[in-house]
Amino acid sequence: MRVIAGKARRLNLKTVPGLGTRPTTDRIKETLFNILQPDIPGSSFLDLFAGSGGIGIEALSRGAACCVFVDNDPKAVSVIRENLAFTRLDADAQVLGLEVQRAISSLQGHAPFTFIFMDPPYHKGLEPKVLELLYGSSLLDEETTVIIEADLHTDFSWLGDAGYELVRTKTYKTNKHIFVMKRK
């Protein structure tokens, strides 16, 4: 896994040992950031279920002003910190070693993020729970784009009932990115 573009371009990132995380492949990450690139410079980024931090680090490398990384696995937190130090992007980063729900609560009062990326464990039903918490928080407003990485078969027909609007879906061979915004 490597940084695709920007200040830390071509630097290889460490991954979390074991099978507990699924790093987003370079190809999928490149496709995602080709979609987001026009709005990345100067943006604020929240990376939930951050794993090794590859998505948030890519955002920082491409010009995001700041990124908050959240993961409750101590090994992941350690790898994120190592990757941030190695890429020299740690000055604009905050790493929270908390469960996502607790992190959202602890960040209450923070200005809305431009982008919130979440890659929760598949088939655990965490997407509705996290989106519900975000909906009532200061972290999200009508301008925030939430990107959810999910299994191809994950159902999102409930988004409208939760107060979200599906903006875009990008499907890959094994998974998909869902782009949603808080309904205005």
Image (cartoon, grey):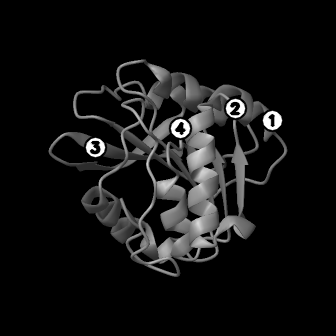
Task: Tell me which label, 1 or 2, sits earlier in the chain.
Answer: 2
Q: Which mark's residue is nearer the viewer, 2 or 3? A: 2
Q: Which mark's residue is nearer the viewer, 1 or 2? A: 2
Marks 1 & 2, CB-CB < 8 Å contact:
yes
Instruction: Please give the residue where the numbered disc 3 appears in the rendered image.
Output: 176
**Please, is residue 91 above or below residue 112 in the view?**
below
| Residue at left offset 60%, top offset 71% | 64
Q: CA distance from mark 2 to mark 3?
A: 25 Å
Callout 1, which amino acid?
Answer: Ser
Outermost residue to the bottom: 7
Outermost residue to the right: 109
Q: Position of residue 127 (x, y in %)?
A: 47, 28
Outermost residue to the top: 124
| Residue at left offset 78%, top offset 41% | 107
Q: Secondary structure at mark 4?
A: loop
Marks 4 & 1, CB-CB < 8 Å contact:
no
Q: Which mark's residue is nearer the viewer, 4 or 1? A: 4
Task: Tell me which label, 3 or 4, sits earlier in the chain.
Answer: 4
Can you tell which quarter of the image residue 2 is in? bottom left
Instruction: Please give the residue where the numbered disc 4 appears in the rendered image.
Output: 49
Callout 3, which amino acid?
Answer: Lys
Callout 2, which amino acid?
Answer: Leu
| Residue at left offset 36%, top offset 66% | 35
Q: Secondary structure at mark 2?
A: loop
Tag shown at residue 106: 1
Tag shown at residue 3: none
